[in-house]
Image (cartoon, rainbow, N blue to C red):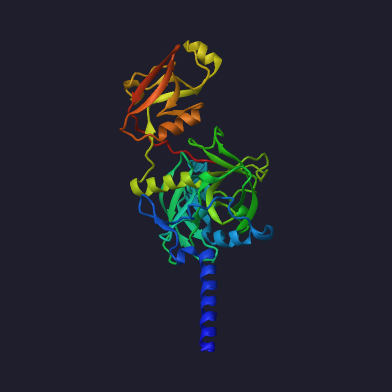
Amino acid sequence: MKRIWLLFSQAVTVFVAAYFVVATLQPSWLGRGTVRSGAGIALIEAPANTSAASQQPAAGSFSAAARKAAPAVVSINTSKAVRHPRSNDPWFQFFFGDQGGQQQQAGLGSGVIISPDGYILTNNHVVEGADEIEVTLTDSRRARARVIGTDPETDLAILRIELDKLPVIVLGNSDTLDVGDQVLAIGNPFGVGQTVTSGIVSALGRTQLGINTFENFIQTDAAINPGNSGGALVDVNGNLLGINTAIYSRSGGSMGIGFAIPVSTARLVLDGIVKDGQVTRGWIGVEPNELSPELAETFGVKASEGVIITGVLQDGPAAQAGMRPGDVIVKVDGKNVGNVSELLSAVAALKPGTAAPFNVKRADALVELNITPGVRPRPQRNVRR
């Protein structure tokens, strides 16, 4: 009897140990935390009570977080054919022929597997204009990826690959981040291979950087370099907090100022693209500008905060509701707006076809307009360099 009990206790110990290892490194195998997004995509979420700073690494090591997250971060190689600027020159064609005008241009970036269904999050500028996209996993498997959709206004793209037994990253909650929280950046800088760097959250809600139309960046001093674009920003638990997107640099290398798109934004883009083929945003048809004393004096408005409207599209949603040039928008649907970026984000969040109140300062009076937003037009494609 004693021997049977000993064998039983050993078996239970081995089972618990194996479960702990799998639950930590490959939670997707257990289906733990698996949820369905609004578009029906299988995702793995961290427990709701887990914050970015709720667990400190043992003895200052981030190895557990890196082991958990790194397998789901992939390298992305792109290629596209570009024509030589002199390809139409008869003399150029005489010496080099038609093929001489075509050159293959290669690109490099990173991506994050977010679903066992093969969906990958990356940056739009990583895959924009690419003829071929190849994804390489950390286990050396390679696969051709197809573009499900892109959102240039947030610089996000959704890819999909057809492979089984994919490692999947666990989605964290970027809304719980605080300045000073420790984070890791995982990607493939300069094509040297997967690299993990560490740092802290330097700032939150960075806007007006001129990078994207809609900006709400996480700023970090974790080293991000060319090739890291589209890679993962994770917390000390290995949960995804953002998609690394851009750096501030005078030399082309890391200077300790990097920017990542929050995972909360990425999830909205993911659902919109997979469900509707695009991200649907509100639009009212105005030309906004930052409020300055000069503009306030020009339009004769007495306001010290808000966003001044210098142009209104004829027959657009705002014009139909009575908005005029010189109006200063101070609130959208009950939310204060203090700059153009906040106004764009507030309007974009509105549901097209559903009226919303806009509080407007006109001359020295406060007016409320009920505007029914339309669908924001898709931006014209341009190549980001």
- Choose between 124 and 269: the one closer to the eye: 269
195 left or right, relative to 317: right
Identified at 55% across, 63% down, the residue is 138
Q: Give the quadrant of residue 284.
A: top left
- Choose between 76 and 260: the one closer to the eye: 260
Residue 30 x, y percent position in the rendering:
45, 66
- Choose between 160 and 108: the one closer to the eye: 160
Q: Is residue 177 visible?
A: yes
Residue 27 x, y percent position in the rendering:
48, 63
Q: Is residue 166 visible?
A: no
- 54 shown above or below 28: above
283 left or right, relative to 253: left
Number of numbered discs visible in the structure rendering: 0
Residue 112 x, y percent position in the rendering:
50, 55
- 77 shown above or below 359: below
Identified at 49% across, 27% down, the residue is 340
Residue 113 x, y percent position in the rendering:
48, 57
- 292 shown above or below 149: above
Name of the residue lying farthest toward the front: 1
322 left or right, relative to 102: left
Q: Quadrant where the C terminus lies?
A: top right
Identified at 54% across, 14% down, the residue is 294
